[in-house]
Amino acid sequence: MTNAANLVAEADRAAASGDLERAQALLGEAAESGANDSSLFLKLAGVQRATGQPDLALASVHRALAIDPRDFTALLMRASLLDRLDDAEAPEAWAHAIAQKPEGQLPPGLVQAIAQGEQRVAAWQDQRDGKLRAAMAKAEAAADDDTRHRLDRFRDNILRKKRVYHSEPTHFHYPALPEYEFHPRRAFPWIDQLEAATAEITAEFEAVMAAERAELVPYIQYPEHQPLDQWRALNQSRDWTAIHLLQNGGRVEANARHCPRTLEILGSCDQPQVRGASPNAMFSLLAPNTAIPAHVGVNNARLVCHLPLIVPEGCWFRVGGETRHWRRGESFLFDDTIEHEAMNPSDELRVVLIFDVWRPDLTPVERQAIAAAIEAETPGVEAGL
């Protein structure tokens, strides 16, 4: 054993016998011997705390964190010591500690400490939220609805209430595009016409479902050898199926012939025309009690539109840090290259019309170049929905 290890062993015996003063002296000597072991400094901090020296204990914890900045025990001890010292940094220290909470079952004492820390963080966040709202109130009063929504997210980002998500397409990333999760309705002049036709589109869906030659296929279909683990649970599954009207630029006649009104409306929706990839449009059917796992799409130059047709209670859809519930006849457009997921927790079928459109902020020249690049990569890339 090294000299430091001998000193620690002797200190443990001293602490076990109740001689905390000697244990502290021995651990201090070991610490000054040049040992680079965070657990040594945590032992020393524990003895210093037990002997009523929180300032010294905090200094020892800081030495431990200098060795291992993400050590959960050290972060937790730091937060509790700052609380004991009535330090203004205590709530943020609790937030740092909770962020490193290990997975799995924890000892009851730790569970209780974490719960107390979470209460401290929540109160601190509420206080900060109030200050931010007061500071931003004048500007926010002059903002439109979309801007107010972004300001809300800005506050959430400052307070770290939500994770910040980014566009991460699997294949085609066009640079310098704004990263909206859900895009403002005002950018899509055709959306009111689409929503007004909800009943007609639903009727055409029902006609397709009743047709003998309708093609209802699994939404996810790929060879098992492909490295697509995010889809493995739903690959070839009948829990998430689709009735394609337009698929990778082609018309699926067996289904499309039953849906003239739907296709007429889609014709005004600025869909991409990309050989082998777009346009795409389908009825998406999500079975009862089925989840769609978090995933990202292929191409950030297009957006995806949902028009909910049949929506049981409780069905939700998350894009990045924002979750919405589908509501019949209420469309939204989102960037599917930002992580998203969905859930049908009900005992009934959920049906949504899904189709792709160009991003409205792309110029004609950009659209032409993007389409040419995607066509050059197709086949070999599944660029559709």
Image: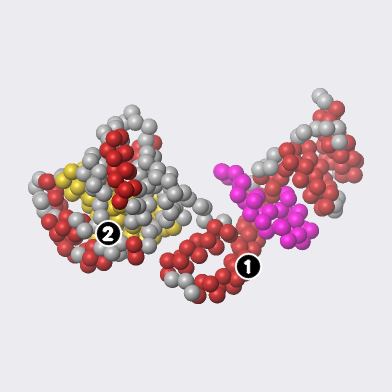
Lower sequence index among marks 2 and 1:
1
Q: Which mark is residue 307?
A: 2
Magenta segment, principal secondary structure?
helix
> Is residue 168 something that shows in the picture?
yes
Please state, as top left, top right, bottom left or bottom right, where the N terminus lies in the image.
Answer: top right
* Residue at (69% x, 42% y) in the render: 69
The verdict on residue 104 being magenta is: yes
Quadrant of residue 8 within the rendered picture: top right
* Residue at (29% x, 40% y) in the render: 372
Q: Magenta stretch?
A: 77-106
Expressed as whole percent of the image width and height from the top left, the position of residue 246 reads 19, 47
* Residue at (32% x, 43% y) in the render: 369
106 relative position to 4: left or right: left
The verdict on residue 184 being magenta is: no
> Is residue 350 something that shows in the picture?
no
Residue 368 position (above or below residue 381): below
- Furthest residue in direction front, as rendered: 365
Asked which secondary structure carries label 2, the reply is strand
Q: Nearer the viewer, residue 95 or 165?
A: 165
Q: Residues within 10 Å of mark 1 (few under 14, many from 20)?
A: few
Quadrant of residue 217 within the rendered picture: top left
Q: Amino acid at mark 2?
A: Leu
Please state, as top left, top right, bottom left or bottom right, where the C terminus lies in the image.
Answer: top left
Expressed as whole percent of the image width and height from the top left, the position of residue 345 reads 35, 55
Q: Nearer the viewer, residue 103 or 140?
A: 140
Expressed as whole percent of the image width and height from the top left, the position of residue 353 reads 24, 55
Q: Which mark is residue 127?
A: 1
Expressed as whole percent of the image width and height from the top left, the position of residue 273 reads 23, 47
Residue 32 position (above or below residue 326): above
Find the distance from the CA under tag 2 to the CA under tag 1.
39 Å
Asked which secondary structure carries label 1, the reply is helix
